[in-house]
Image (spheres, rainbow, N blue to C red):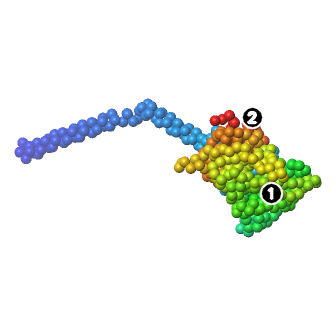
Amino acid sequence: MDPVVSISVLSLLLGAVIALLFFKTYFLKRRSEVQSIAKSEPQPSDPKKPSKPSQPVSRKSHSKAHSHASDKEQNKRHHPLDLNTLKGHGDSVNGLCFSADGQSLATACADGVVRVFKLDDASSKSFKFLRINLPAGGHPTAVAFSDDASSVVVASQTLLGCSLYMYGEEKVKASNENKQQSKLPLPEIKWQHHKAHEKRAILTLAGATASYGSGDGSSIIASCSEGTDIIVWHGKTGKILGTVDTNQLKNTMATISPNGRFLAAAAFTADVKVWEITYSKDGSVKEVMNVMQLKGHKSAVTWLCFSTNSEHIITASKDGSIRIWNINVRYHLDEDPKTLKVFPIPLRASSGIALHYDRLALSPDGKILAATCSSTLQWLCIETGKVLDTAEKAHDGDITCIAWAPKALPTGNEQVVVLATAGVDKKVKLWASPSVTSS
C-alpha cells in the first residue's frame, strides 16, 4: 500500500476516534445536566407541597382582614354609649336642638344648610332629613325650634351682621298632583330680622314655652350676642318682647328656663345675672327685669343650664368647680339665691392643672349632667358629682354643642334617653344615657 494513502487512512481513523470521544463526553455531560434539572423540578411542581404552606398564609391574611374590619367598626363606635352618627354635614356643626317631642333634631352647619332629622329610631342606619338652604352668603351659627317641629328659628351670620329667620312649612293646596307627590313641602321664611344685634354675631339661641303663671303657652326665643345684649323674641311672630344688657364686657351664652319664667346669662365675669320674664293677664310678655345674681364663683362662668323644674341653675366655672343654685326664692323680699352643692370638676391636664367645662346639659329626669371639655364628653351624677362615664375624643376636635332629647327615643326594641353632640369634625353623634349606678 502506498505510504501516503496509509498515513491518510490512519489520520482519518485517529480523527474519528477523537471525534467519538468528544461527542461521548459532551452527551454524558448534557445527560447529567438534564438529570440534575429533572431532580430539582418535581419539588416546586408538586401541587401538594405548596398547598400546605399556602393555607396558613391565606388564613393569616383573612385574619388581618377581619381584624381591620373590626378596627374600623371599633373606630366608628369606640365607646359603648355611642349609638349612632348623623351623616351628611359638609362643615363644622355649630348648633343643634331637639323638638319638644324629641322626634326631630335640627342642626346648623357652617356649610350654609340647616338640616332637620327625623329620629324614628335612634339606631337606624340612615335618617330622613329636611334640608333648608339659607340665603346666599349666610352661615348658620345657632338653631332653635319654635312652636312645633315644623317651625325653626335660625341665626345666620353674614359680613353685614347676623340675621334671624323663622322657617315654617308652606301650606300646600290639596290637588291630585300634590297627592301623587310623596315629598314633604319645602319650608318658607315666615319672618326675618336683619342685623338683629347690629353687626355682632349671635352665639346662642334658646327656646322655651311660656307656661309659667299667665303665660299663653307660646314659644319664646332668646338670642345672645357676642356683645352684652340679649333679645327675647316671640317665636311665631318674630316680635321683640324684651331686650337686656348684661354689662359684663362680653357674653358667653344665655338660656331660658323650661317654663319660660327666667332668663340667665354667663358672661365675662364670675357672676351670673338672672332676669324674670313676667306675663300680662292676656298671656303676652309684660316685661323682662333683672331680679337676682348668682355670686360665689371665683372666675368666669363658662356655661349654665336650668333644671327641668326651672327652680335650679347649674353653673360651671374656670375656677374648676360646678355649683347648683336654688333660685326659687322670694327675691322681691331681698332673699338671695342659695348655693345647694359645690363639686370640683373631675378633669386634669397632663400637667395636673384643673380643667373647666365648655358645655353643660341636664338630662330630662334631672339625674345626669352631661359636660364637655374640648373633645372629651363626661356624664356626672347630679347628686354626688361623681363621674358615671367618660368618652375621651368623643369627636375628632372640639365639641361645639350638646342637647338631651326631652323624651326617651325608640332604639331598636327599647326606649333610650339620648344625648346629641356636635363638633368641628362635621359629625353629630347620638349617645345613650349611662346608668346612674355606674361608677
Residue 64 in picture, x, y percent from top left: 52, 39
Residue at the outermost right position: 282
Which residue is more in the foreground, 203 or 287? 287
- Residue drawn where x is 52% and y is 36% of the image: 63
Residue 413 disc label: 2
The answer to whether residue 38 is left or right of residue 230 is left
The answer to whether residue 50 is left or right of residue 6 is right
Sequence-wise, the earlier of marks 2 and 1 is: 1
Q: Quadrant of residue 197?
A: bottom right
Q: In the structure shown, which secondary structural element does the residue marked by tag 2 occupy?
A: loop
Say which residue label 1 marks. Answer: 290
Instruction: Tell me if I can see residue 32 in this picture.
Output: yes
Which residue is more in the foreground, 45 or 199? 199
Residue 215 in picture, x, y percent from top left: 89, 51
Instruction: Tell me if I can see residue 124 in this picture.
Output: no
10 Å crowding of disc 1: few (<14), some (14-19), many (20+): some
For the residues labelled 2 and 1, the Cα–Cα distance comes to: 47 Å
Labels in figure, total: 2
Quadrant placement of the N terminus: top left
Amino acid at the residue labelled 2 = Asn
Quadrant placement of the C terminus: top right
- Residue drawn where x is 70% and y is 43% of the image: 341
Amino acid at the residue labelled 1 = Asn
- Residue drawn where x is 55% and y is 38% of the image: 67
Residue 29 in picture, x, y percent from top left: 25, 38
